[in-house]
Each structure stands twice: as structure tokens, then as C-alpha cells.
Image: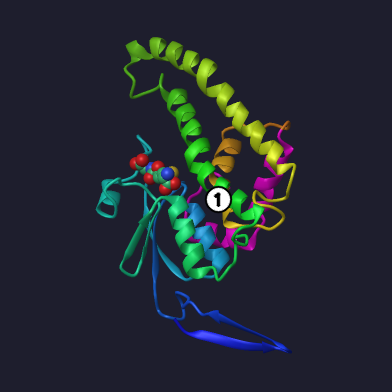
Amino acid sequence: MPRVTEGLGEIEISYDVRPTARGANIMVTVHHLEDSRSQRVLWLLEELGVEYEIELYKRDPRTMLGPDSLRQIHPLGKSPVVEDGERSIAESGAIIEYLVGQYGNGRLIPAEGSDERLAYTYWLHYAEGSLMPMMLLKLIFDRLAHPPMPLVMRPAAALIALGVKGKFITPRLKDQLDFIEGELAKSTWFAGDKFTAADIQMSFPLEAAEARGAIGEDRPRIRQFVTRIHSRPAYKRALERGGPYAYA
Ligand SMILES: N[C@@H](CCC(=O)N[C@@H](CS)C(=O)NCC(=O)O)C(=O)O
């Protein structure tokens, strides 16, 4: 990897110059499903100024699932998947870590060993490890008593859904959203006072929660967070590139 040395008066600094996708003619491809988590990856690439191309996939309008063609990219058939040269990377958190490490040159990530770095790692995992599973459960049980559930079974399904949501999902989701609201009272961004890729990772669940009416006026900090991210120029550029996105 080429090194650059610069003199700053008496101080001389050397740093590795990682090739940008544009400079080295590397093309990053994002396998992007409309209205999905993969919007985060487009946004991250825009923040980093890395050139990329998009393979856009449409959801089945009836089931809302992704198309089978995504399985040719990764056995699980989920989006996002990023290809960078010979590399193929799945799972949002892993993709964010990879792109920030490869193209960030120290941007969008707090210094190693700092408290902010620990917070960064925490939120990077928390978004998909804790928050999204609970939101997905809520979505599944919200839809349980609707087609394709046969008409005759819908009343029983509605009762089951009501019970599971009331006893299990709603209180846990409330705990999580209260927790996030409290954490955002401590600093502007999730990992301190500087915007990082952890904020990008946290964007999707919070946008989705707000769009589904789960963020009331009692959670002003989450609302402000969502408003703040939507005003970023890189966020807007990613929206223009990515096609339909119901949560902006
Ligand atoms: N934890 C994974 C989740 C991937 C995932 O479930 N992606 C959704 C998009 S929001 C998807 O591909 N859904 C299409 C389907 O399940 O058919 C990640 O963060 O990458």
C-alpha cells in the first residue's frame, strides 16, 4: 500500500493511502432491496465518497419478500450484500465495519480504545442483534390475522397476536425505545458528539419505528435524531440513487 509523508512544521506524519474505489477503478456493487436496510449502505458509501453501483431488487408486492435472484448473490437471499472486487460481504454490521475499515481512513469511527469506540461497537451490534428482532416480531404478529391467513382462522390468530404482543413484544419494545431515548439524552450521536457509522446502522430501525407510529411525542430525542440524519446531504444523495424508500 502506498505511503504519504507530509511535513507540518517540526512534525512529520506518514499514513497509508488506501485506494478509493474511484481512483483505483475498483467498483463496489451494492445488492440493494427497495425499501430496506440496504439503504444504509448506500448512505455510508455517500458519506465516505466511495463510488459504487447498485443492483436493485424489487419486493414481491404480495409477500413483501425479496426475489429469488438474491439467493444467487448469497445463500440466505437477503439484502444488503456488497461486492468489492473478489470479495462478497453480507450482514449490515459486517458491511459497515468492512467499508469503514477499507475506505474510511479513520472517518466515521471513534479512536480505538476510547469510550466512544466501545459505544460505537455496542450500537453497531445492538441495532441488528436486539432492536430489529423485536421489531420484526411485532411486524409478524401485526400481520398474523391478515391474508394469507385463511379467513376462518383469523379470529383465533387475532387473539393469539393480541396475547403475544401484550405480554411479550410491546413491553420489551417499550423498554428498548425508552432506553434509546435515554441514551440520546447523553450525547448528540450514538457514539458521542461526533456522527459515526453507528448512527447509520441505528437509522433503519428508528426510521421504521417512527414510520409505524411507535415514536410518539414522549420520545423527542429519537424524533430529532431521525430529522437530523434526514438533513444530511449524503443521506439525500443516497435516497436519490436508491429508488423507493418508505421511511425517509
Ligand atoms: N441482519 C441482516 C438482515 C438482512 C435482512 O433481513 N434483510 C431484509 C431487508 S430489510 C431482506 O433481505 N428481506 C427480504 C426477504 O426476507 O426476502 C442484515 O442486517 O443484513
Along the line of sight, the residue nearer the viewer: 34 or 25: 25
Q: Is residue 117 left or right of residue 71?
A: right
**Residue 55 visible to an observer of this rendering:** yes
Residue displayed at 49% across by 53% down? 39
Instruction: Tell me residue 201's x, y (percent).
Output: 54, 50
**Where does label 1 land, which residue?**
121
Eyeballing the image, is 5 above or below 108? below
Q: Which quarter of the figure has residue 24?
A: bottom left
Instruction: Tell me residue 135's x, y (percent).
Output: 50, 33
| Residue type at tag 1 | Thr
Does the beta carbon at disc 1 come under 8 Å from ligand 1? no
Q: How is the image coloured?
A: rainbow
Along the line of sight, the residue nearer the viewer: 200 or 3: 3
Instruction: Tell me residue 231's x, y (percent).
Output: 67, 56
Q: Which quarter of the figure has residue 224?
A: top right
The reply to whether the magenta stretch includes residue 228 is yes
Along the line of sight, the residue nearer the viewer: 246 or 225: 225
Eyeballing the image, is 144 above or below 67? above
Q: Quadrant of the N terminus?
A: bottom left
The reply to whether the magenta stretch includes residue 227 is yes
Residue displayed at 47% across by 48% down? 37
Eyeballing the image, is 9 above or below 52? below
Residue displayed at 55% across by 71% down? 105
Give the structural element (helix, strand or loop) at label 1.
helix
Q: Is residue 66 left or right of residue 19?
A: left
- Ligand 1 visible in quadrant: top left
Magenta residue span: 219-248
**Residue 242 visible to an observer of this rendering:** no
Residue displayed at 27% across by 51% down? 69
